[in-house]
Image (cartoon, rainbow, N blue to C red):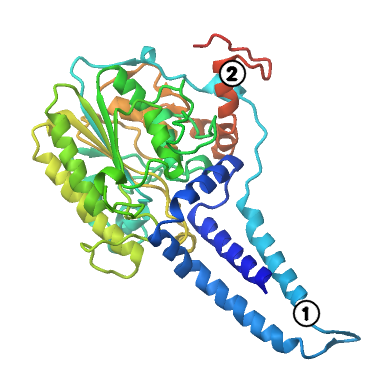
Amino acid sequence: MITILLLAIGISACKDVYESTGPLFHDEWVALLQSTATYKDNTKIVMLFVVKYLIENLILAITALVLFHFMTQYTISIYKYSFKPTYRFLSFVYLISFIFMAKPLYKPPVVTSSKFLYENSVLPSLDEIEFPEKKKNLIFISLEAYETMYFSKEHGGIYETSKSPNLESFAFSNNSIFFSNLNGDKVGGVNVIPRTKFTTAAQFAMACGYAFLTEPPRSGLTNNEPYFPKFKCLWDILKEVGYNTTVTYGTTPNDWGIGDLYYSHGINKLWSKYDVLPNSNDIYALDRDITPFFMKALTEMSQSKDPFFASFLTLDTHEPGFKCQDCIYEENSMITVVKCSDKRISNLLKWMEQQSWYNNTVIALFGDHIVRGNGYPELAERHNFSRRPFNMIINSGMRSNYTRNREFTSMDIYPTLLTAIGTKVKKNQLGMGIDLFSGLPTLVEKYGIKKFIKECEGTKIFYNHIIHGIEDDGIRVKGFF
């Protein structure tokens, strides 16, 4: 009986992981298990798991046990065969079910080399970038799981009436630009690949131009382990030329190791849940609390003579939707928080327009990945809809004839953001990312998405080459730095 109940809990955990992250590589499993240690004491996270997954599976398990208890009193005959059910048989059924659920969650390693990256990427450095004499501020708003499917059909979404009317309107203002995989007035976005499907990985790709495969194990701020420290990410570059760099977000620093990522790559100040809600036991601070904190931080940074980079990661639109008291309930929890977030972010943008520093500031909004679970994969399939995170750049002044019918990934955001603030990226490329303003084909457009995904797995080998001079495929790059 205990075995069956434990397997029921295991099946519940598999369903949770599958809907939350999907299949994971080995290093991602390590990170997930490390992060789980920070979640287990949080009541909201535990109760969400219990209500959404555990109760259902425990009820099924208990029902099966009760039925099986009665079945063990009888001998069952099928054709010429007779048998008497035992609890071992039920345990075997649950074990097979658990294996069936668990097996698809592990992604086997992809055998590759670093040759592709060595031939097709540009190692970021200040030598590759020219900054203008007057530097622009950059505000980067990372919208949690914010997809274009929420928009109206007229503008590339799924719904007849937009669930995100304010941001949809901003996207088509004269002061905004967005890049799309679609034509005309259809809002599209980045192609989410396996190595950018969760927040930390997406942040790394957008800022560093490479796939997020860890060099050391991720373990939060305990040891402050760096992530590919020799890669010059956006934050490193901006800090080197005098920017004050900050990040504000509502989780803990050791949530998927995101604190290590920022501190390893040029962020001067990290404001996490501990700063926003220092006396709260919750693992998350919702956007209602984070937004005014971020506004205050912007006001303080703007008083310095130095240019600033300020990043803000929203949270509420993480599945299944975290509703605060400001939200008016709609048709389901996700639509409720999307409409609420749409209003809150648009109000934040309107507030920025009134600030003295606005005219010298570029504002970039990017969805980090797509929603996992909550019925959205099935909804998209019914509509034959290609799911893409939202993107928009405001107040750049840059224009391009190459904004539509583009296939690009989060890695292309790095050089694109630098161009947006008026810098010159000499080769129109940093890392594996191509400046989308330039019109040069991205690596996805050049080689196809399948090959691009495969070659991303060579990132760690490539990193070891350029740092340690390790040979592979006849390539020797010792002394690269």
Q: Quadrant of the N terminus?
A: bottom right
Q: Are marks 2 and 1 in contact (CB under 8 Å)?
A: no
Q: Can you identify the residue that label 1 sits on?
A: 86
Which of the two residues, 101 or 401, is positioned nearer the viewer here? 101
| Residue for point 54% across, 8% down | 479
Horizontal side of residue 292 vs 218, given as left or right: left
Q: Amino acid at mark 1?
A: Thr
Residue 163 visible, this angle: no
**Residue 336 found in image quarter:** bottom left
- Compared to residue 461, the image places residue 77 above or below, namely below
Q: Is residue 211 left or right of residue 468?
A: left
Image coordinates for residue 106, horizontal then vertical, percent: 63, 49
Q: Residue furthest front?
A: 279
Give me the C-alpha separation between circle 2 and circle 1. 58 Å
Q: Residues within 10 Å of mark 1 (few under 14, many from 20)?
A: few
Q: Residue furthest right?
A: 80
- Identify the residue at horizontal 20%, vertical 14% (top origin): 133
Q: First in sequence: mark 2 or mark 1?
A: 1
Q: Secondary structure at mark 1?
A: loop
- Kind of residue at badge 2: His
Judge by depth and name the residue closer to the eye, 449 or 370.
370
Q: Is 334 situated left or right of 295 in this image?
A: right
Q: What's the mark number on residue 465?
A: 2
Q: Which of the 4 image quadrants contains residue 376?
A: bottom left
Circle 2 residues within 10 Å: few <14, some 14–19, many ≥20: many
- Measuring from the top left, give residue 321's x and y in whole percent: 35, 60
- Residue in the picture at 18% in, 47% down: 292
Circle 2: element type: helix
Q: Nearer the viewer, residue 14 or 80?
A: 14
Residue 45 in the image: x percent, y percent?
42, 59
Q: Position of residue 272 (x, y in %)?
A: 31, 42
